[in-house]
Image: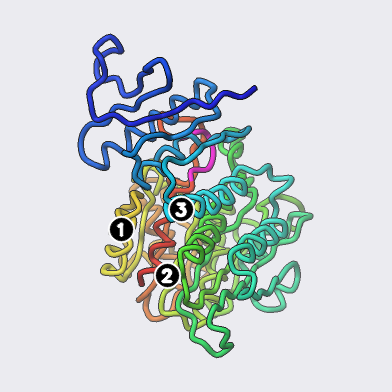
């Protein structure tokens, strides 16, 4: 028989017998989390306490008492999440609105976590697209239509990036263009377009990764999972604007038909790109998606991708990196992140970053061969800037360094974290 452990909050310091600065103690009936400091510190303590309980094999808990705010309960839920198996969490109190909000947060995040943590034999381009259609249809069954472009259809329509990256796999590359239109008016303007990198497995191609570097590359579709879950969450929170969701999905593998170093891709906008690294593939597929987004006329375009190790080096695994020429929009986005307790940091992007990867054979290259002094994350964002409309006004690029943990930490279990979903949902709701 399963036993439910009760968890209460305390604003008193723990008895010294539990050790200095103990955050988690037992009163013989259940557990108490001891809070100190301002709100951000308290949320950190709660998430770490939840993680500690879960690592001790406790998988069935109920939050009790009157002190649990919605933010506090959600912090506990994130720390209590596990990569494998089941964990049962009962919310505190009987406020139906709070419970509905928490359940919506959990449903969208759980979907993204399941996608990102899913084994690559199960999550591949077409299956990811089908799961995304089902997730948006779950929250908006009356307002969803879509088109799936796959295989050689991509080439026929000029989407050279997705096709080139994915053509070596037996599981064909594909692009989803989904239309969430709650207005019922087919002529309604598109308020926003979301673009997600959906590399469901990344070997690096001929620029092959090491075994250690490849082991977690099922997470390279984290951008697609994040923007899909963000749209799902925003809809559940009342989004009433038309939004396009564009997922650029491929497996980056190797065979005799794989794209190679030295290949030159000619994009639909006429830009020619020399391939200097087949492991810089995310920007190649996003370029197609950003052009699709531009064709919608949306004044707001957001892309998300596990794009560069450079962003990870710059901001670590607790922040996502934000780029944009529209600095006011970028700063508002960071502010929206603060309201949902997610951390984002703006990194440099200037017009010159568009030309920091020169090629003598093409308009630009997909990376640079320089060995040092390279702003890799900014250069990647600069590459994407070639494919956005309006000189980048209204465009945000998220390099989502915080969306995946290769191993468990004091706050997170191994695998997907869901960080980024709530920030992007807030942007959709507020802009």
Q: Which residue is the site of mark 3?
A: 96
The residue closer to the viewer here, 293 or 8, is 8
How far across and down, in percent of the image, does residue 376 sit? 40, 53
Camera sees residue 279:
no
Q: Residue furthest front?
A: 94
Rendering quarter of residue 59: top right
Quadrant containing the C terminus in the rendered view: bottom left
| Residue nearest the observer in this picture, 395 or 132 | 132
Residue on which disc 1 sits: 334
The secondary structure type at the circle numbered 3 is helix
**Whole-number angstrom distance, CA of label 2 to CA of label 3:** 44 Å
In the image, residue 21 sits, relative to residue 45, either above or below, namely: above
Which span is picked out in magenta?
412-417
**Mark with earlier residue (1, 2):** 1
Q: Quadrant of the N terminus?
A: top right
Q: Position of residue 362 (x, y in %)?
A: 52, 70
Residue with the most extreme bottom position? 187
Residue 385, disc: 2
The structure residue drawn at horizontal position 53% and vertical position 82%, both measured from the top left corner, is 183
Q: CA distance from mark 1 to mark 2?
A: 20 Å
- Residue at image location 46% in from the left, 63% down from the top: 237
């Amino acid at each position: 028989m399963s036993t439910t452990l009760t968890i209460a909050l305390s604003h008193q310091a723990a008895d010294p017998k539990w050790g200095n600065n103990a955050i988690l103690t037992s009163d013989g009936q259940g557990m108490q989390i001891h809070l100190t400091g301002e709100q951000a510190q308290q949320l950190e303590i709660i998430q770490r306490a939840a993680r500690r309980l879960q690592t001790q094999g406790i998988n069935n808990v109920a939050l009790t008492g009157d002190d649990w705010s919605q933010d506090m309960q959600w912090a506990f839920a994130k720390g209590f999440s596990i990569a494998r198996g089941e964990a049962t969490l009962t919310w505190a109190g009987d406020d139906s609105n709070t419970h509905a909000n928490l359940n919506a947060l959990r449903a969208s995040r759980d979907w993204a976590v399941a996608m990102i943590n899913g084994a690559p034999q199960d999550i591949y381009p077409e299956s990811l697209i089908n799961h995304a259609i089902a997730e948006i249809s779950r929250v908006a069954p009356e307002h969803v239509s879509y088109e799936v472009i796959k295989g050689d259809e991509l080439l026929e329509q000029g989407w050279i990036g997705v096709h080139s990256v994915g053509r070596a796999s037996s599981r064909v590359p594909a692009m989803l263009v989904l239309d969430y239109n709650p207005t019922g008016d087919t002529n309604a303007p598109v308020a926003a377009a979301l673009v997600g990198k959906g590399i469901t497995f990344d070997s690096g191609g001929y620029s092959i990764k090491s075994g250690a570097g490849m082991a977690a590359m099922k997470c390279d579709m984290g951008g697609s999972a994040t923007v899909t879950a963000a749209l799902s969450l925003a809809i559940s929170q009342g989004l009433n604007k038309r939004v396009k969701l564009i997922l650029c999905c491929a497996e980056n593998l190797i065979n005799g038909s794989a794209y190679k170093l030295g290949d030159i891709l000619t994009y639909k906008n006429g830009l020619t790109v020399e391939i200097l690294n087949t492991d810089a593939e995310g920007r190649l597929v996003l370029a197609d998606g950003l052009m699709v987004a531009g064709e919608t006329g949306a004044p707001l375009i957001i892309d998300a991708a596990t794009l560069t190790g450079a962003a990870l080096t710059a901001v670590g695994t607790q922040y996502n990196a934000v780029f944009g020429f529209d600095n006011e929009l970028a700063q508002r986005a960071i502010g929206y992140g603060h309201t949902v307790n997610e951390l984002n940091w703006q990194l440099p992007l200037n017009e010159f970053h568009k030309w920091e990867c020169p090629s003598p054979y093409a308009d630009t290259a997909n990376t640079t061969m320089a060995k040092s002094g390279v702003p890799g994350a900014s250069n990647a964002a600069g590459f994407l800037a070639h494919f956005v409309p309006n000189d980048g006004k209204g465009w945000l690029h998220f390099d989502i360094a915080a969306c995946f943990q290769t191993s468990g930490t004091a706050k997170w279990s191994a695998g997907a974290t869901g960080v980024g979903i709530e920030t992007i949902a807030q942007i959709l709701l507020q802009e």
